Amino acid sequence: MNINELLLSKIDQANQQQTTQLASVIKQDIVQEKSTSSSPDLIKRRLMARKRALERDY
C-alpha cells in the first residue's frame, strides 16, 4: 500500500466515524424533541435549526 492509499484509507475511516457520530446526535435530537414538544411544526423548526448548527460545526 502506498502513502496515497494509506491516507485515503485514514480519511475514509475518519469520515465514516464522523458520519456515525452525526447520525447519533441527530437521532438523539429527534427523540428529545418528540418527548418535549407537542407541536409538529415546532419540532420541525427546532430540528432544522439544529441541523444548520451541526452543518456549521462539522
Image (cartoon, rainbow, N blue to C red):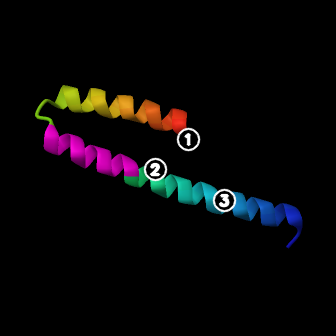
Residue denoted by label 1: 58
Left of 18 or right of it: where is 42? left
Query: Contact, CB < 8 Å: mark 1 with mark 3?
Result: no
Q: Quadrant of the N terminus?
A: bottom right
Q: CA distance from mark 1 to mark 3?
A: 15 Å
Which quarter of the figure is the C terminus placed in?
A: top right
Q: What are the residue bounds of the magenta stretch?
A: 25-36
Q: Amino acid at mark 1?
A: Tyr
Badge 2 vs badge 1, beta-carbon distance below 8 Å:
yes
- Earlier sequence position, callout 2 versus callout 1: 2
Q: Which residue is mark 2?
A: 22
Per the model, the C-alpha gap separating discs 2 and 3 is: 15 Å
Q: Percent position (x, y) of residue 3?
A: 87, 65
Label 3: element kind:
helix
Crowd around label 2: few <14 · some 14–19 · many ≥20 (10 Å): some
Is residue 25 positioned above or below 8 on the image?
Answer: above
- The image quarter containing residue 12 is bottom right
Sequence-wise first label, 2 or 3: 3
Q: Which mark is residue 42?
A: none
Label 1 vs label 3, nearer the camera: 1
> Which mark, residue 12?
3
